[in-house]
Image (tube, grey):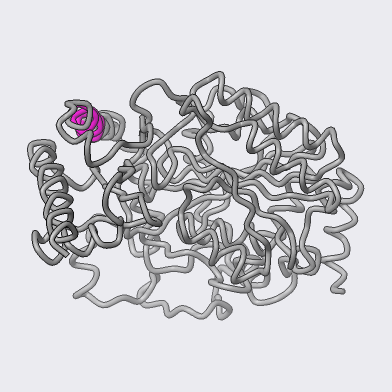
């Protein structure tokens, strides 16, 4: 094993042996090189005032070489802020700005010890990093039965972990904290579990309320007290899009110092929060018991980044930083929030009208981009195909009964027509079936 990896492992074992035990074999082996091209280039950038012949970029007239045809479209920005490589951990100013935003929006973090956000190539990359660091073959990854299908690829296919499901809703149509607790305690023989908490939930658009949030935290603490090391990943892709009756913070703050056997990891980003899907700017943030522990985890994270993408794109980091620092940012973001909230509320009022009750119910939703219909009489995939082929309407079929509808991408004035077409399609399928 490389001496740097060994040193990081020794730090983790000393600061919190439970966190060290959470690491995968890859997580224990990975490190960020201190001697090499990046470190030598960084030293040269600070000291080589005459000539810097280290890093693999081209310089012309004292600034990064670039094509005029590209710079003309980006003339607001200095070449040094878009063409140079960003550091593996991300643009320092962006990391600081995102941390400030995180603390303002999640007051429950308070004075709890958290690391500096590390920039990822959006949230999927952040989840992939966490899978590399913590998931080994046979490890259990606990997610609800209503989930984003990419978790299977990220944890099960790539890393050989085992997906463990529990029902998202209980009989009261609230978050099923008892199901989460049961799934966690079932891992006692393994002594380790990875939990993914995705709120607002994709595909249902559900976020727990305050009492449910406390129940989730209690379930995770119960597992820790039973001797299970728990890595909790808060997938906060749709953070901030909380409309009614839900928590308005990430559970990361509640879980940050809940137990020494719990490692809370916040995975978020500008992707959905700031409506910049194609920018691919995300973040990974750790909570921990000491600065030394956080530093070791961050060094291993940087090692994963260095070994895969080297660093994230610089231009989009600069664009997001510019937005965060703009005096118009909060007002403009609030305007978009109100549009999204209006679409969610209009969707709910249409569904609550009663005129579709013979065709479907719907799962509770109060946040995010989506909601899910629970079909009563037709197959979800058959309905999806019929809508697409006969009416030019796109939806997502999930299993036999669930149809995901993204109200986020439908103008509020068009939502009633959308659901009327879905209902019409159900009736058309029923008619065909009855004639056979």
Residue span colored magenta = 339-349
The spot of residue 191 in percent (x, y) is: 84, 49
State the image quarter where residue 48 is shown: bottom right
Residue 262 position within the rendered picture, expressed as x and y whole percent measured from the top left: 75, 39
Residue 79, located in which quarter of the rendered image?
bottom left
Quadrant position of the C terminus in the picture: bottom left
Residue 305, quarter of the rendered image: bottom right
Q: Main secondary structure of the magenta part?
A: helix
Q: Which one is in front, 333 or 162?
A: 162
- On screen, residue 143 versus residue 162, left or right, reads left
Q: From the viewer's perspective, is residue 95 above or below residue 151?
A: above
Residue 199: percent from the left, percent from the top? 47, 38
Q: Residue at x 13, y 49 (%)?
A: 427
Say if residue 93 shows up in the picture. no
**13 left or right of 166 in image:** right
Residue at horizontal 41 percent and vertical 77 percent from the top: 59
Q: Quarter holding the N terminus?
A: bottom right
Q: Residue at x 43, y 24 (%)?
A: 246
Residue 126 visible within the image = yes
Q: What residue is drawn where x is 23% and y is 42%?
A: 407
Q: Is residue 109 above or below residue 179?
A: above
Query: Residue 323: percent from the left, percent from the top?
Result: 32, 43
Compared to 297, does 112 lie above or below? above
In magenta segment, residue 380: no
């Amino acid at each position: 094993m490389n001496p740097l990896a060994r040193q990081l492992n020794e730090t983790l074992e000393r600061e919190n042996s439970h966190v060290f035990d959470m690491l995968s074999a890859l997580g224990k082996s990975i490190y960020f090189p201190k001697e090499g091209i990046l470190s030598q280039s960084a030293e040269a950038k600070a000291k080589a005032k005459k000539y810097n012949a280290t890093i693999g970029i081209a310089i012309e007239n004292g600034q990064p070489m670039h094509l005029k045809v590209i710079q003309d479209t980006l003339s607001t920005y200095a070449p040094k802020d878009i063409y140079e490589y960003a550091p593996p951990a991300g643009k320092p100013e962006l990391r600081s700005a995102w941390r400030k935003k995180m603390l303002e929006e999640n007051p429950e973090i308070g004075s709890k010890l958290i690391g500096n956000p590390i920039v990822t190539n959006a949230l999927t990359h952040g989840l992939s990093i966490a899978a590399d660091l913590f998931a080994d073959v046979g490890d259990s990854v606990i997610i609800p039965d209503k989930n984003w299908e990419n978790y299977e690829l990220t944890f099960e296919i790539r890393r050989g972990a085992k997906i463990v499901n529990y029902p998202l809703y209980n009989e009261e149509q609230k978050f099923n904290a008892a199901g989460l607790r049961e799934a966690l305690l079932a891992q006692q023989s393994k002594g380790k579990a990875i939990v993914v908490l995705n709120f607002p939930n994709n595909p249902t658009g559900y976020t727990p309320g305050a009492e449910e949030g406390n129940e989730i935290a209690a379930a995770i603490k119960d597992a820790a007290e039973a001797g299970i090391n728990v890595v909790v990943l808060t997938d906060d892709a749709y953070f901030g899009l909380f409309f009614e009756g839900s928590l308005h913070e990430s559970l990361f703050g509640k879980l940050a110092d809940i137990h020494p056997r719990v490692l809370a990891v916040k995975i978020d980003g500008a992707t959905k929060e700031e409506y910049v899907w194609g920018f691919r700017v995300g973040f990974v943030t750790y909570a921990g018991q000491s600065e030394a522990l956080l530093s070791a985890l961050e060094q291993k994270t940087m090692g994963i980044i260095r070994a895969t993408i080297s660093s994230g794109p610089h231009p989009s980091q600069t664009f997001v930083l510019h937005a965060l620092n703009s005096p118009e940012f909060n007002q403009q973001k609030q305007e978009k929030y109100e549009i999204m909230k209006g679409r969610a509320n209009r969707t709910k009022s249409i569904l609550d009208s009663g005129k579709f009750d013979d065709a479907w119910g719907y799962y509770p939703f109060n946040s995010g981009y989506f909601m899910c219909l629970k079909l009563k009489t037709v197959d979800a995939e058959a309905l999806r195909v019929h809508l697409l082929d006969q009416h030019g309407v796109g939806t997502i079929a999930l299993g036999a009964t669930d149809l995901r509808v993204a109200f986020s991408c439908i103008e509020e004035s068009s939502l009633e027509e959308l659901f009327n077409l879905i209902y019409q399609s159900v009736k058309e399928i029923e008619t065909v079936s009855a004639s056979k």
